[in-house]
Image (cartoon, rainbow, N blue to C red):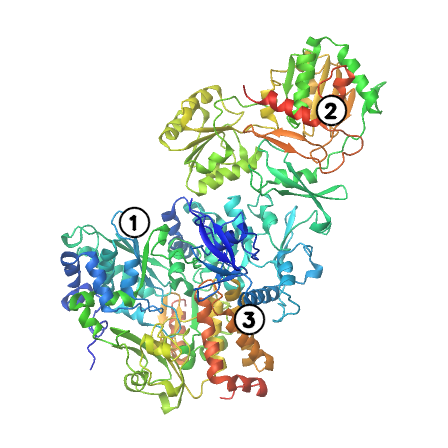
């Protein structure tokens, strides 16, 4: 909705970010069905809801793996040997490119902007959890642990 | 009202309080270039084209959003401003494909015009090599994302003016794209093809398919008129070239619609594929034969004169001008004393005469009773949806398939009208929109709202209000007519129900623009001009009398609806007024409520 | 040794709990403010303290409070900006995770001072632990009667709730934050009108950074005079500095404003890793122009850094050693800004993209001589042209890089590779 268009029930609209999180949790990602349901529930145009979902980087309109590995490519992570090095390592290790998902559907590799862990960099996020002071060795451990849940 | 005084380019300017710098400049005829700004839309301040230098402000400020203050000193074309504008243009021209030579809008493009104005003669940045999609899934227009400058005029038009909310912006930053719904092709979206986005697009991103490459604006003529396709009476501009209507645009200055149109008003008239009647035809030995006007009118006059008044019948479409309807009544009802007269569409009962369509925007509760504007008067449905966006509560008292049901706060059946009335009584500015589908009881119940509410009858057809005022709807029985005059005009009509009742030997005259089952049955066909080919006036559903103008010559030997009736009257020896102006005045007088 | 104020509880076990906060003198400013002061007095006190916003712009907090319309009949709101995302900055996350009650106490006092009865925390979506800590702390404050109806019998009521953002740096800009709170795309609004007159849902709104609010209880407890005795005359009070990059002890350090940059780098942060030579320092987060080794004696205060041609920003110091490629630094930061541009206005949307393209070309050894000139011209032209301050922020890494290390840019063109 544009600035200047006063809307009927502002409080209802304010629930949109939260509603999208809930939908994303239930559906795995924001499917068209999920977006439609959110739109109907909050009585908002689907175009608006989709526009919102695509604006914010934490909402996904495409399916991802079970674990989304987000490597911070911020400056502070890069300076201490993170970012590119960890991305390269993960790409080789998982045999994929940034943006792709492993064939077993377990891991999706992404890069993100600053995670506000510059004092404990390099940092990465796996789904909602933050991992700091990362090294290739610690990545190996992490991947092993995560895989262990799905044997 | 105390005015705000400021100086623009050394010139003293006064503007009403609350004006932006751009508005103040426009009042003084000082041109500040804009791209994302559009007079009909809320200012956005996004494109940075209208930046101006304001004394005391560290940065250049966008004229479209910056408020004026007393004593302000503005420079609109200072060297600093010009550098900034050129920079913005450099960026825009290189962002996507703006290679003007191959663009439909070349010569009519706001971006291109600004390129010329600021002397862009080369690309500072390498042009974008990325290809963007072209969405051609809509019949009437296409969206070429390569030409899009992300000014969001279309998005704002779709939400602010039409309240349809189909268009939006996807992603962010350089990835931003205009999209429909959840990034689906236009043709599969909730788009209602009103074409308002098309009319506001400053570049060649949204292009009318029918008139594409048919001529630049400078090579065309614009004729203002009134839309003749429903009872709202929207102002239109017919864009013509070499005697052809290229496209229709909404008239931004029109009092009723202020620029917006619907699919039925903007596109459908130009995509009408029905076969025209271009010559008068008279049935001879069972077959319709082409003839001249004089012979045809003679045949009509003879048929009518030879029939007793009680055996004469008149059936009229409301797709006719005030003048034609006036002559129809004058000739048949008053001169020939015919009482078997009827209209081709139903008429809503009169509940109250107070109220106008403009009141919709001010209302806090809207009752829609026995009318389906989404289908029948789309522009009125835009007004309703806009009000709902602003917080008005909508109560639909009609069938479940009413197009406004998805937007309604409450849906009621006609027998539950009292609940709607109760809610409306408690509101501050209730608005009642009703139509021919209303029941007698419901109409009586609504009268309780008295002076508190605004009422507008959304009539079916076009000039229904005028036809009703002229008393042309006093019941009609086709079977009682031995001679029948049918003014069907442009109306797309399945004549079967009428034809079934018409006696085998009845003499049938049809005044029509298109061939139809009715013309098949006719003994005389009088070819009638269509909306673009005739002048006259129309009365909209609020009772507003507006001019309709002629942009092109009638096809073949077709004549304006009123002209045909005027000639027929003369043929029958009745002088009922000859010039259009005389007729318009007489008609307006006859239509005006006592 | 400077007595810690904002981070004094950080070392305590379960420092985030309400019990630890109260046991260490927490929630003592609140009754004082509610029972002994009227709102005007509080505004005066904060003005006298000289507290300036810690979110980046450094606007005097007391003046911001003063802009809010007076009167209890007007609906007003307070927003707590926890949308920290500027590369190099991680102080707000620590404050929320380690001592959220300190902020809550500040929010209540600020709300009372401006007459707001509803406050919202807007927190960056990535801060999962932060969200949890916020919610738990707010619940705790409600349970103790610090939030809700009739707080401590004062007649003042306040509700506070948490809104989680969803990944957009621009939402740290106050009007974009408000848009996001309203459930819209986080695109900044035009100013004027400012949030103090037209903010959340069209009502007057005070937006404050977390660290700014954390200072409030201490000012009330110990007085404006005590507070303004810390720091420099124009930059008063304690500041949490974040230091990252090529130093031994990366992390946060609470120090008085005006502390020399040298002291932070070489004493608190333990100096350069591997004793490499210092090449450049970003003093206040990604959007602040860089400083060179000869400027490390600059005091870290608003006015002194401005004199040095940069800004205090968020106080996020990024230290870079001699092995750092400055074109790469600029490219990285530009990628950040281009990625975070909301896309509304032309110069930010396409200008940052153009600059990024050029930097990528240079870094890849495909740059042409005129590229550097185009890069600089583009940056200069973006300056002051964008809808919100983000455009000005985005160009700083490039402009300061070109000013200080132009030869390095040129080397990339002439040698088609990096000099380091």
Image mark 1: chain: C
Image mark 3: chain: C
Q: Image quarter for residue B72?
A: bottom left
Residue at image coords 58%, 87%: C414
Left or right: A56 with respect to B325?
left
- Cα–Cα gap, marks 3 and 2: 65 Å
Q: Position of residue C34 (x, y in %)?
A: 17, 57
- Name the element at disc 2: strand
In the foreground, A18 or C87: C87
Can marks 1 and 3 be said to lie on one chain? yes
Residue B575 appears in the figure? yes
Query: Which residue bears the numbered disc 1?
Result: C75
Q: Earlier in the sequence, mark 1 or mark 3?
A: 1
Q: Position of residue C40 (x, y in %)?
A: 21, 57
Query: Which residue bears the numbered disc 3?
Result: C354
In the foreground, C97 or B146: B146
């Amino acid at each position: 909705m544009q600035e200047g268009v006063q809307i009927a029930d502002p409080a209802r609209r304010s629930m949109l970010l939260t509603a999208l999180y809930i939908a994303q949790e239930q559906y795995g990602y924001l499917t068209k069905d999920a977006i439609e349901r959110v739109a109907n529930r909050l009585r908002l145009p689907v175009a608006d809801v989709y526009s919102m979902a695509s604006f914010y980087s934490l909402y996904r309109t495409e399916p991802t793996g079970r674990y989304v590995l987000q490597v911070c490519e911020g400056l502070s992570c890069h300076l201490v040997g993170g970012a590119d090095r960890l991305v390269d390592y993960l790409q080789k290790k998982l045999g994929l490119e940034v943006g792709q998902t492993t064939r077993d559907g377990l891991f999706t590799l992404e890069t993100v902007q600053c995670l506000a862990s510059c004092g404990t960099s390099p940092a990465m996020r796996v789904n909602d959890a933050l991992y700091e002071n990362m090294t290739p060795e610690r990545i190996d451990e992490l991947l092993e642990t995560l895989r262990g849940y799905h044997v | 009202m105390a005015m705000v005084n400021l100086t623009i380019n050394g010139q003293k300017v006064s503007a009403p309080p609350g004006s932006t710098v751009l508005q103040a400049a426009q009042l003084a005829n000082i041109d500040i270039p804009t791209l994302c700004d559009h007079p009909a839309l809320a200012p956005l301040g996004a494109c940075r084209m209208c930046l101006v230098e304001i004394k005391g402000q560290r940065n250049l400020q966008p004229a479209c959003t910056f408020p004026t203050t007393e004593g302000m000193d503005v420079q609109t074309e200072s060297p600093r401003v010009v550098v900034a504008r050129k920079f913005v243009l450099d960026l825009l021209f290189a962002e996507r494909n703006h290679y003007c030579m191959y663009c439909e809008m070349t010569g009519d493009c706001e971006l291109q015009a600004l390129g010329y104005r600021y002397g862009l003669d080369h690309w500072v940045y390498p042009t974008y090599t990325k290809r963007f999609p072209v969405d051609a899934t809509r019949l009437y227009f296409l969206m070429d994302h390569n030409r899009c400058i992300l000014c969001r005029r279309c998005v704002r038009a779709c939400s602010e003016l039409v309240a349809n909310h189909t268009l939006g912006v996807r992603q962010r930053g350089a990835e931003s794209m205009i999209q429909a719904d959840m990034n689906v092709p236009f043709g599969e979206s909730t788009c209602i093809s009103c074409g308002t986005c098309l009319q506001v697009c400053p570049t060649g991103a949204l292009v009318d398919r029918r008139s594409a490459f048919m001529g630049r604006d400078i090579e065309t003529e614009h004729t203002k008129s009134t839309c003749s396709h429903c009872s709202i009476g929207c102002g239109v501009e017919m864009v013509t070239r070499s005697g052809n209507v290229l496209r229709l645009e909404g008239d931004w200055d029109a009092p009723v619609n202020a620029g917006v149109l619907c699919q039925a008003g903007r596109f459908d008239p130009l995509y009408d594929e029905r076969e025209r009647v271009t010559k008068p035809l008279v049935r001879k030995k069972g077959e319709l034969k082409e003839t001249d006007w004089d012979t045809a009118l003679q045949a009509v006059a003879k048929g009518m004169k030879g029939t007793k008044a009680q055996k004469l019948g008149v059936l009229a479409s409301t797709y006719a001008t005030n003048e034609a309807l006036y002559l129809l009544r004058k000739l048949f009802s008053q001169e020939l004393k015919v009482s078997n007269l009827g209209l081709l569409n139903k008429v809503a009962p009169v509940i109250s005469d107070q109220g106008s369509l403009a009141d919709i925007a001010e209302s806090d509760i809207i009752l829609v009773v026995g009318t389906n504007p989404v289908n029948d008067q789309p522009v009125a449905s835009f007004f309703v949806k806009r009000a709902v966006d602003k917080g008005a509560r909508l109560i639909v008292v009609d069938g479940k398939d009413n197009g406004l049901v998805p937007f309604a706060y409450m849906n009621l059946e006609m027998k539950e009208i009292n609940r709607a009335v109760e809610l409306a009584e408690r509101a501050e500015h209730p608005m009642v929109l009703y139509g021919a589908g209303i029941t007698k009881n419901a109409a009586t119940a609504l009268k309780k709202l008295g002076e508190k509410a605004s009422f507008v009858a959304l009539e079916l057809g076009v000039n229904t209000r005028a036809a009703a005022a002229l008393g042309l709807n006093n019941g009609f029985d086709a079977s009682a007519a031995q001679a029948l005059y049918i003014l069907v005009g442009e109306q797309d009509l399945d004549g079967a129900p009428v034809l079934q009742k018409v006696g085998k030997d009845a003499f049938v005259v049809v005044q029509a623009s298109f061939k139809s089952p009715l013309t098949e049955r006719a003994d005389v066909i009088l070819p009638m001009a269509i909306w673009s080919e005739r002048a006259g006036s129309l009365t909209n559903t609020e009772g507003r009398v507006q001019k309709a103008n002629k942009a092109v010559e009638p096809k073949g030997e077709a004549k304006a609806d009123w002209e045909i009736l005027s000639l027929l009257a003369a043929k029958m020896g009745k002088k009922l007024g000859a010039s259009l102006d005389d007729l318009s005045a007489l008609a307006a007088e006859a239509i005006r409520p006592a | 040794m400077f007595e810690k104020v904002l981070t004094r509880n950080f070392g305590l076990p379960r420092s985030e709990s309400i019990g630890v906060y109260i046991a260490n003198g927490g929630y003592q400013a609140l009754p004082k403010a509610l029972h002994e002061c009227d709102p005007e007095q509080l505004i005066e006190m904060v003005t006298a303290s000289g507290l300036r916003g810690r979110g980046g712009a450094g606007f005097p907090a007391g003046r911001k409070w003063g802009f809010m319309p007076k009167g209890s009949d007007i609906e007003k709101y307070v927003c707590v900006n926890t949308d920290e995302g500027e590369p190099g900055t991680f102080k707000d996350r620590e404050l929320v995770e380690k001592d959220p009650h300190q902020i809550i106490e500040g929010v209540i006092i600020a709300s009372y001072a401006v007459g707001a009865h509803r406050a919202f925390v807007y927190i960056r979506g990535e801060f999962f632990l932060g969200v949890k800590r916020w919610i738990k702390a707010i619940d705790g404050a409600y349970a103790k009667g610090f939030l809700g109806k009739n707080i401590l019998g004062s007649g003042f009521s306040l509700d506070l709730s948490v809104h989680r953002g969803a990944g957009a740096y621009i939402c740290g800009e106050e009007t974009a934050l408000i848009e996001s709170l309203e459930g819209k795309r986080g695109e900044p609004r035009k100013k004027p009108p400012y949030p103090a007159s037209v903010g959340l849902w069209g009502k007057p709104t005070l937006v404050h950074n977390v660290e700014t609010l954390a200072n409030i209880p201490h000012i009330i407890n110990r007085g404006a005079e005590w507070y303004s005795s810390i720091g420099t005359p124009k930059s008063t009070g304690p500041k949490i500095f974040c230091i990252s990059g090529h130093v031994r002890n990366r992390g946060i350090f609470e120090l008085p404003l005006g502390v020399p940059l040298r002291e932070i780098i070489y004493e608190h942060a333990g100096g350069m890793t591997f004793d490499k030579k210092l090449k450049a320092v970003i003093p206040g987060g990604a959007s602040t122009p860089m400083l060179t080794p000869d400027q490390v004696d600059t005091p870290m205060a608003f006015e002194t850094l401005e004199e040095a041609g940069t800004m205090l920003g968020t106080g996020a110091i990024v230290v870079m050693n001699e092995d750092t490629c400055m074109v790469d630094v600029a490219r990285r930061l530009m990628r950040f800004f281009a990625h975070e541009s909301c896309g509304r206005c032309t110069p930010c949307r396409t200008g940052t993209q153009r600059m990024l393209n050029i930097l990528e070309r240079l870094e890849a050894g495909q740059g042409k001589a005129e590229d550097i000139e185009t890069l600089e011209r583009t940056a200069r032209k973006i300056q002051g042209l964008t809808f919100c301050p983000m455009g000005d922020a985005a160009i700083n890494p490039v402009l300061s890089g070109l000013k200080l290390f132009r030869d390095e840019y040129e080397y990339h063109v002439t040698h088609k590779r990096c000099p380091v």
